[in-house]
Image: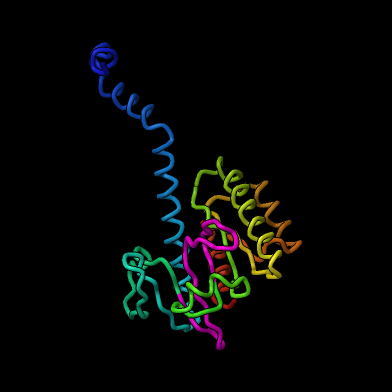
Amino acid sequence: MLIDKYLEPAGKSFVEELVFRFLLTRGDTLGGSMRNVGGALAQRKLTRALLSALTLGNVNYRWKQSSNGTWANRADENADVELYLSGLAWTLNGQNRTLVYNVEVPLVQNNIDLVILNCTPEQFSASKQDPKKYVALGELKGGIDPAGADEHWKTGKTALERIRTAFAANNASPKLFFVAAAVASKMATEIWRDLEIGSLSNAGNLTDSEQTGSLCAWIVEL
Protein backbone atom coordinates (compact mmCIF):
# COMPACT_ATOMS: atom_id res chain seq x y z
CA MET A 1 0.00 0.00 0.00
CA LEU A 2 2.82 2.39 0.86
CA ILE A 3 4.54 1.72 -2.47
CA ASP A 4 1.38 1.84 -4.60
CA LYS A 5 -0.18 4.85 -2.92
CA TYR A 6 2.80 7.08 -2.15
CA LEU A 7 6.15 5.96 -3.55
CA GLU A 8 5.27 5.10 -7.15
CA PRO A 9 3.33 8.35 -7.72
CA ALA A 10 6.34 10.27 -6.37
CA GLY A 11 8.49 9.03 -9.27
CA LYS A 12 12.14 10.05 -8.92
CA SER A 13 11.33 11.79 -5.64
CA PHE A 14 10.37 8.50 -3.98
CA VAL A 15 13.34 8.73 -1.55
CA GLU A 16 12.17 12.08 -0.17
CA GLU A 17 8.62 10.73 0.04
CA LEU A 18 9.82 7.66 1.92
CA VAL A 19 11.74 9.79 4.43
CA PHE A 20 8.73 12.06 4.85
CA ARG A 21 6.43 9.09 5.54
CA PHE A 22 8.97 7.66 7.99
CA LEU A 23 9.05 10.91 9.94
CA LEU A 24 5.27 11.05 10.04
CA THR A 25 5.16 7.48 11.37
CA ARG A 26 7.77 8.10 14.03
CA GLY A 27 6.00 11.19 15.33
CA ASP A 28 7.75 12.58 18.44
CA THR A 29 9.87 9.48 18.93
CA LEU A 30 12.78 11.12 17.11
CA GLY A 31 12.35 14.24 19.20
CA GLY A 32 12.48 12.14 22.34
CA SER A 33 15.64 10.43 21.13
CA MET A 34 17.33 13.76 20.50
CA ARG A 35 16.30 15.02 23.94
CA ASN A 36 17.92 11.91 25.44
CA VAL A 37 21.10 12.62 23.49
CA GLY A 38 21.07 16.24 24.66
CA GLY A 39 20.63 15.14 28.26
CA ALA A 40 23.51 12.66 28.02
CA LEU A 41 25.82 15.27 26.50
CA ALA A 42 24.90 17.79 29.19
CA GLN A 43 25.61 15.23 31.91
CA ARG A 44 29.00 14.46 30.40
CA LYS A 45 29.91 18.14 30.15
CA LEU A 46 28.92 18.79 33.75
CA THR A 47 30.80 15.68 34.87
CA ARG A 48 33.98 16.82 33.15
CA ALA A 49 33.68 20.20 34.89
CA LEU A 50 33.14 18.45 38.25
CA LEU A 51 36.21 16.30 37.69
CA SER A 52 38.21 19.44 36.93
CA ALA A 53 36.94 21.12 40.12
CA LEU A 54 37.90 18.08 42.19
CA THR A 55 41.33 17.89 40.57
CA LEU A 56 42.01 21.62 40.98
CA GLY A 57 40.98 21.36 44.63
CA ASN A 58 43.27 18.35 45.09
CA VAL A 59 40.26 16.36 46.31
CA ASN A 60 40.45 12.60 45.91
CA TYR A 61 37.33 10.95 44.54
CA ARG A 62 35.70 7.70 43.48
CA TRP A 63 33.41 7.25 40.50
CA LYS A 64 30.44 5.01 39.82
CA GLN A 65 30.62 2.88 36.71
CA SER A 66 27.33 3.12 34.82
CA SER A 67 27.79 -0.34 33.28
CA ASN A 68 27.73 -2.33 36.52
CA GLY A 69 27.08 0.15 39.33
CA THR A 70 30.40 -0.50 41.08
CA TRP A 71 32.61 2.26 42.43
CA ALA A 72 36.17 2.68 41.18
CA ASN A 73 39.04 4.70 42.62
CA ARG A 74 40.33 7.78 40.86
CA ALA A 75 42.85 6.93 38.17
CA ASP A 76 45.78 9.08 37.12
CA GLU A 77 44.57 8.81 33.54
CA ASN A 78 40.85 9.57 33.44
CA ALA A 79 40.38 10.50 29.78
CA ASP A 80 36.78 9.97 28.66
CA VAL A 81 35.77 8.66 32.09
CA GLU A 82 32.64 10.85 31.85
CA LEU A 83 31.36 8.48 29.16
CA TYR A 84 31.09 5.65 31.68
CA LEU A 85 30.29 7.53 34.88
CA SER A 86 26.97 7.84 36.70
CA GLY A 87 28.14 9.11 40.07
CA LEU A 88 30.98 10.70 42.06
CA ALA A 89 31.99 10.49 45.71
CA TRP A 90 34.52 12.51 47.69
CA THR A 91 35.44 13.61 51.21
CA LEU A 92 36.24 17.23 52.02
CA ASN A 93 36.81 18.74 55.46
CA GLY A 94 35.72 15.49 57.06
CA GLN A 95 32.36 15.45 55.22
CA ASN A 96 31.40 12.59 52.90
CA ARG A 97 29.59 13.52 49.71
CA THR A 98 28.07 11.17 47.14
CA LEU A 99 26.59 12.57 43.93
CA VAL A 100 24.53 10.29 41.70
CA TYR A 101 22.70 11.11 38.48
CA ASN A 102 19.06 10.17 37.82
CA VAL A 103 17.97 8.95 41.22
CA GLU A 104 14.43 8.08 42.26
CA VAL A 105 13.95 9.99 45.50
CA PRO A 106 11.43 8.16 47.73
CA LEU A 107 10.17 11.35 49.36
CA VAL A 108 9.35 12.94 46.00
CA GLN A 109 8.46 9.67 44.21
CA ASN A 110 10.17 10.95 41.09
CA ASN A 111 13.50 10.72 39.34
CA ILE A 112 15.78 13.67 40.07
CA ASP A 113 18.61 14.58 37.69
CA LEU A 114 21.28 15.14 40.34
CA VAL A 115 21.26 14.12 43.99
CA ILE A 116 24.01 14.82 46.54
CA LEU A 117 23.87 13.04 49.89
CA ASN A 118 25.89 13.28 53.09
CA CYS A 119 27.14 9.69 52.99
CA THR A 120 29.61 7.29 51.43
CA PRO A 121 28.66 5.31 48.31
CA GLU A 122 28.15 2.22 50.45
CA GLN A 123 25.59 4.10 52.57
CA PHE A 124 23.75 5.68 49.63
CA SER A 125 20.82 3.26 49.30
CA ALA A 126 19.95 3.50 53.00
CA SER A 127 20.70 7.23 53.25
CA LYS A 128 18.35 8.24 50.43
CA GLN A 129 15.46 7.17 52.67
CA ASP A 130 16.44 9.88 55.19
CA PRO A 131 15.43 13.45 54.20
CA LYS A 132 18.10 14.91 56.49
CA LYS A 133 20.87 13.19 54.50
CA TYR A 134 20.17 15.21 51.36
CA VAL A 135 22.68 18.00 50.84
CA ALA A 136 21.48 19.22 47.44
CA LEU A 137 19.28 18.28 44.49
CA GLY A 138 19.47 19.68 40.99
CA GLU A 139 17.72 19.78 37.65
CA LEU A 140 19.83 19.45 34.51
CA LYS A 141 18.40 20.46 31.12
CA GLY A 142 20.52 19.63 28.08
CA GLY A 143 18.39 21.06 25.26
CA ILE A 144 20.38 23.59 23.24
CA ASP A 145 17.51 25.14 21.25
CA PRO A 146 16.88 28.65 22.67
CA ALA A 147 13.27 28.42 21.48
CA GLY A 148 12.63 25.61 23.94
CA ALA A 149 14.65 27.02 26.83
CA ASP A 150 11.71 28.63 28.62
CA GLU A 151 9.77 25.37 28.48
CA HIS A 152 12.71 23.49 29.99
CA TRP A 153 12.88 26.07 32.75
CA LYS A 154 9.17 25.72 33.51
CA THR A 155 9.55 21.94 33.74
CA GLY A 156 12.63 22.22 35.92
CA LYS A 157 11.10 24.89 38.15
CA THR A 158 8.01 22.72 38.71
CA ALA A 159 10.21 19.75 39.66
CA LEU A 160 12.24 21.88 42.07
CA GLU A 161 9.10 23.27 43.71
CA ARG A 162 7.83 19.74 44.16
CA ILE A 163 11.13 18.78 45.81
CA ARG A 164 11.09 21.85 48.08
CA THR A 165 7.52 21.16 49.24
CA ALA A 166 8.16 17.46 49.93
CA PHE A 167 11.30 18.11 51.98
CA ALA A 168 9.81 21.09 53.86
CA ALA A 169 6.97 18.80 55.02
CA ASN A 170 9.68 16.63 56.59
CA ASN A 171 11.57 19.52 58.20
CA ALA A 172 14.43 19.33 55.73
CA SER A 173 15.75 21.99 53.38
CA PRO A 174 18.46 20.73 51.02
CA LYS A 175 19.97 23.21 48.58
CA LEU A 176 18.38 23.32 45.12
CA PHE A 177 20.13 24.22 41.87
CA PHE A 178 19.39 24.41 38.17
CA VAL A 179 21.72 23.86 35.21
CA ALA A 180 20.83 24.33 31.54
CA ALA A 181 22.54 24.27 28.17
CA ALA A 182 20.29 27.03 26.83
CA VAL A 183 19.16 30.08 28.80
CA ALA A 184 16.75 32.63 27.32
CA SER A 185 16.57 36.23 28.59
CA LYS A 186 13.17 35.92 30.31
CA MET A 187 14.25 32.65 31.86
CA ALA A 188 17.49 34.23 33.11
CA THR A 189 15.51 37.01 34.81
CA GLU A 190 13.33 34.48 36.63
CA ILE A 191 16.33 32.40 37.68
CA TRP A 192 18.08 35.50 39.04
CA ARG A 193 14.96 36.42 41.01
CA ASP A 194 14.79 32.92 42.52
CA LEU A 195 18.46 33.16 43.47
CA GLU A 196 17.85 36.51 45.16
CA ILE A 197 14.91 35.26 47.23
CA GLY A 198 16.64 31.97 48.06
CA SER A 199 14.34 29.61 46.19
CA LEU A 200 17.45 28.51 44.30
CA SER A 201 20.86 28.14 45.92
CA ASN A 202 22.78 28.15 42.65
CA ALA A 203 22.36 27.99 38.88
CA GLY A 204 24.53 27.85 35.81
CA ASN A 205 24.62 27.96 32.02
CA LEU A 206 26.52 24.97 30.63
CA THR A 207 27.64 26.99 27.61
CA ASP A 208 29.39 29.50 29.89
CA SER A 209 32.62 27.96 31.19
CA GLU A 210 32.95 30.47 34.04
CA GLN A 211 29.44 29.78 35.30
CA THR A 212 29.90 26.03 34.99
CA GLY A 213 33.26 26.14 36.78
CA SER A 214 31.84 28.27 39.59
CA LEU A 215 28.84 25.96 40.01
CA CYS A 216 31.01 22.84 40.14
CA ALA A 217 33.40 24.40 42.68
CA TRP A 218 30.33 25.17 44.81
CA ILE A 219 29.08 21.58 44.50
CA VAL A 220 32.45 20.15 45.55
CA GLU A 221 32.57 22.42 48.61
CA LEU A 222 29.01 21.74 49.80
Indicate the colouring scheme: rainbow
Q: Position of residue 187 (x, y in %)?
A: 65, 49
What residue occupies the far right of the structure in this picture?
A: 197
Residue 145 spot, x, y in % from top left? 51, 43
Residue plotted at (33% across, 79% down): 75
**Residue 191 rendering spot, x and y as whole percentages:** 67, 55
Q: Which stretch is magenta?
A: 89-116
Residue beneath the point at 71% across and 61% down: 199
Figure check: 180 above or below 130: above
Position of the N terminus, as image quadrant, is top left
Give left or right: position of 3 versus 130: left
Determine the image quadrant of residue 117: bottom right
As drawn, is 34 to the left or to the right of 198? left
Give the prevailing secondary structure in the magenta stretch. Answer: strand
The answer to whether residue 153 is above or below residue 73 is: above
Q: Closest to the observer: 42 or 163?
A: 163
Q: Nearer the viewer, residue 125 or 21?
A: 125
